[in-house]
Image (spheres, rainbow, N blue to C red):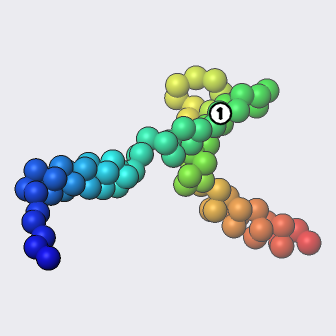
Amino acid sequence: MKYSVDIKSVMIGLFTATLLFGAFSFKQEGSEQIGRYQTAVGEKGVVILDTKTGAYITNPYGNNAGWSKGNFSHTSEIVKETKDKNL
């Protein structure tokens, strides 16, 4: 038996494999950004929360000079220490 390889078919196969590999290897970077930041507005001001990192900024005064930063992990530690002291 004699096998022969058609160069045109090999090239088409390699091109198709490369195209499929490239199409499936891309990661959508922007997809996890949707809904990352959440805002709450109430009687005591504005809070903007980064749901990925737990960082937040608040503005209880409603002006541009009143913004302050925070982090939920740090805030929860302070609350636990305060709660333990008061009990």
Residue type, label 1: Thr
Residue shown at 69%/67% (left/top)? 77
**Outermost residue, top direction?**
63
Up the image or down, 82 lies above or below 44; here it is below
Q: Residues within 10 Å of mark 1 (few under 14, many from 20)?
A: few
Q: Is residue 10 above or below residue 29?
A: below
- Rendered position, 74 above or below 15: below
Q: Residue furthest front?
A: 1
x, y percent for residue 40: 70, 32
Q: Quadrant of residue 50?
A: top right
Work out whether residue 22 or residue 55 is closer to the camera in this orientation and state it.
22
Q: Position of residue 66 (x, y in %)?
A: 57, 32
Instruction: Tell how many labels.
Output: 1
Query: Which quadrant would residue 38 be assigned to in this image?
Result: top right
The answer to whether residue 60 of the structure is visible from this angle is no
Name which residue lies at 12% across and 70% down. 3
Question: Residue drawn 51% across and 46% down?
Answer: 32
Q: Is residue 45 left or right of residue 53?
A: right
Circle 1 SS class: strand
What residue sits 11% from the left and 63% below the top?
5
Where residue 6 sits: x, y (%)?
10, 57
**In the drawing, does residue 76 fall left or right of residue 23?**
right
Quarter of the image with the C terminus in it: bottom right
Q: Is residue 17 left or right of residue 75?
A: left
User: Furthest-right residue in view?
Assistant: 87
Q: Residue 10: in sight, yes or no? A: yes
Residue at the disc numbered 1: 39
Quarter of the figure that contains the N terminus: bottom left
**Left/right of residue 69 with respect to residue 43 in the rendered view:** left
Q: Above or below — where is 5 with respect to 42? A: below
Rendered location of residue 25, percent (x, y): 34, 55
Q: Nearer the viewer, residue 61 or 20?
A: 20
